[in-house]
Amino acid sequence: MRANANDLVSRAEDPAKILDQALMDMQADLVKLRQAVAAAVASQKRIEGQASQSRAQADHWYGRAQLALQGGDEDLAREALARRKTHTDTAQVLGQQLESQAGQVETLKRSLLKLEGKIAQAKTRKDTLKARAQAAHAQKQLEGAVSGISTDSSMAAFERMEEKVESLEAETAAVAELAGENLESRFEALEGGDVDGDVDQDLAALKASMAPAPDLPLLPDTRKVASQQAPTEDELAALRRSLNLPPK
């Protein structure tokens, strides 16, 4: 069945339609067979009726032969027995026909039951075969589609994109690391205070302590100032007098 289903698919036939048609043909045969069985049974009953009637006529003419013989009419009795024989022969022939017809009816009934069983099995298996045929057809289409697809270029594109993403991630990590170091150094400067300013102040103080003292103006000797102050006062008093200014 699997090989036949695959063969149907390979020949682009529709298994569902073929199975439906096969089942329809079997149903048509079943109808014909039922009609044949019905006709055979009807014929059998008709033969049975004719045989029964012939036997009854044979019995009837036998009774008449007895009556004629009792009446002393042998010729009439002989004629009645001849009629009886005709009906008896007819009944025998009909009996043989009845046996043959009964055999035919029995054969047709067995054929009918067998066909009904096959149709029942066909109905049960039809859906399964149709499903298997559909699955085989779908599998064939899928395999054809897959075989016609080349994934090399697609996978190469994925690999390139993966390398690019990894490169971008590395660059981002480097930038983040540099930014983190710069930010950390700024915070360290804030936390440590103005270290450079303190160092500069210490260096200036050290230089000041090691530099020679600057030249300072010499203070006058108080004794010389005292000795020079008196003439100056005399000259000033004389100048005031010359100018007619009152003495201080």
Image (cartoon, helix red, strand yellow):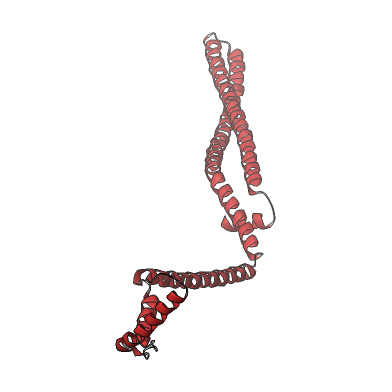
Residue 89, above or below 188: above
| Residue at 61 percent of width and 41 percent of height | 23
Q: Residue furthest top?
A: 71
> Which one is nearer the viewer's eye here, 158 or 49?
158
Where on the picture, by quarter, is residue 198? bottom left
Q: Residue furthest left?
A: 223
Residue 87 is situated, as x and y percent measured from the top left of the image, at 60, 22
Q: Is residue 5 visible?
A: no
- How many discs appear? 0
Residue 227, above or below 119: below
Residue 226 is situated, as x and y percent measured from the top left of the image, at 31, 85
Q: Is residue 243 visible?
A: yes
| Residue at 55 percent of width and 44 percent of height | 127
* Residue 47 falls left or right of residue 192: right
The C terminus, quarter of image: bottom left
| Residue at 35 percent of width and 90 percent of height | 210
Where on the picture, by quarter, is residue 233? bottom left
Residue 185 is situated, as x and y percent measured from the top left of the image, at 41, 73
> Which one is nearer the viewer's eye here, 106 or 243?
243
The N terminus, quarter of image: bottom right
Where on the picture, by quarter, is residue 93? top right
Residue 196 is situated, as x and y percent measured from the top left of the image, at 39, 77
Residue 86, above or below 235: above
> Which one is nearer the viewer's eye here, 18 or 93?
18
> Which one is nearer the viewer's eye here, 75 or 29?
29
Residue 64, above or below 172: above
| Residue at 65 percent of width and 55 percent of height | 9
